[in-house]
Image (cartoon, helix red, strand yellow):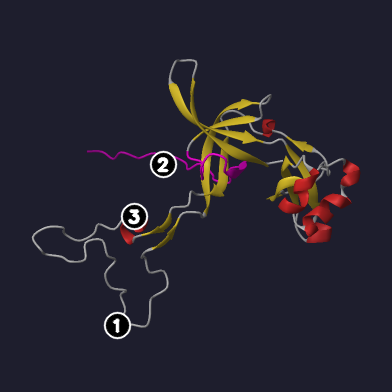
């Protein structure tokens, strides 16, 4: 496996052996259950469906899950898999050796490894162009401007047309974001905690997907000094 579901808990810090302080983000990663397997022969690709956060109360099942999802768990009840609140799919190169009902724990990662973390960013609501796109704005003094924080012209000679991609006021945040090549600082297998050094999308309590990074580290180019 190369991925696991979790929830962002918040910020903390850890001390290295040499006494340096490392700021970290704490993620409760798993435990997850494999609730489905996609094969190339049947589905055209290979992937694993992970279930996270079991629903313990039977009364909440129909409020949280839809009928198709409940039907999916009904098919795998022989594997002793309880319905989960979240289901996400992780692409795998091969699903050999994996089966429904298998546990996926935080120890699939190692300390010092690089991971990609995906989640929804914090929603900011409707914002102006300066806050949303970091525009400089117009002058505030000497009566030189009456627009101040307005986005000015739409950039078209046709007043009924706005070019696609025009930056202006609108909804900010609440987007799917992926932060790449984040270092795993520490792993606590007993408490299912993953401590990473780097930004994690969303607010505390936000659902995140942690996967092995696809980013290849850049090679350093050695400069050749010529004769002076």
- In the rendered image, the vertical position of residue 64 relative to residue 25, given as above or below: below
- Which marked residue is nearer to the observer: mark 2 or mark 1? 1
Quarter of the image that includes the N terminus = top right
Q: In this view, does 217 lie to the left or right of 111?
A: left
Residue at 56%, 38% (x, y): give it: 8
The Cα–Cα distance between marks 2 and 1, rounded to whole angstroms, is 48 Å
Q: Circles 1 and 3: CB distance less than 8 Å?
A: no
Residue depicted at x 64% and y 33%: 109
Residue segment shown in magenta: 199-228
The secondary element bearing badge 3 is classed as: helix
Which disc, if any, is residue 157?
A: 1
Q: Is residue 94 visible?
A: no
Q: Nearer the viewer, residue 49 or 191?
A: 191
Residue 112: percent from the left, percent from the top?
56, 29
Along the viewing direction, whichever of 116 and 165 lies nearer the viewer: 165
Residue 101 percent coordinates (x, y): 83, 41
- Can you tell which quarter of the image residue 168 is in? bottom left
- Looking at the rendered structure, the secondary structure element under dot 2 is loop
Q: In this view, does 142 lie to the left or right of 88?
A: left
Q: Residue 181 carries which label?
A: none
Tell me which residue sits at (63%, 39%) in the image. Answer: 6
> Which residue is under mark 2?
221
SS state under label 1: loop
């Amino acid at each position: 496996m190369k991925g696991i579901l979790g929830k962002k808990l918040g910020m903390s810090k850890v001390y290295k052996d040499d006494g340096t302080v490392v700021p970290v983000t704490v993620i409760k990663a798993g435990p997850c259950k494999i609730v489905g397997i996609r094969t190339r022969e049947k589905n055209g690709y290979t992937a694993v469906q992970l279930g996270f956060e079991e629903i313990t109360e039977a009364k909440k099942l129909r409020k949280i899950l839809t009928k198709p999802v409940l039907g999916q768990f009904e098919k795998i009840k022989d594997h002793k898999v309880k319905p989960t609140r979240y289901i996400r799919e992780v692409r795998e190169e091969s699903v050999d050796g994996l089966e429904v009902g298998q546990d996926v724990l935080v120890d699939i990662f190692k300390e010092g490894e690089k991971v990609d973390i995906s989640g929804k960013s914090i929603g900011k609501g409707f914002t102006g162009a300066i806050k949303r796109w970091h525009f400089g704005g117009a002058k505030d003094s000497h009566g030189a401007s009456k627009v101040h924080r307005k986005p000015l012209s739409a950039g078209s000679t046709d007043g009924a047309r706005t070019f696609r991609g025009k930056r202006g006021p609108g909804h900010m945040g609440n987007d799917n974001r992926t932060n790449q090549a984040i270092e795993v600082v520490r792993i606590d297998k007993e408490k299912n905690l993953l401590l990473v050094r780097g930004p994690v999308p969303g607010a505390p309590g936000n659902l995140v997907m942690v996967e092995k990074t696809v980013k290849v580290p850049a090679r350093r180019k050695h400069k050749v000094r010529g004769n002076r």
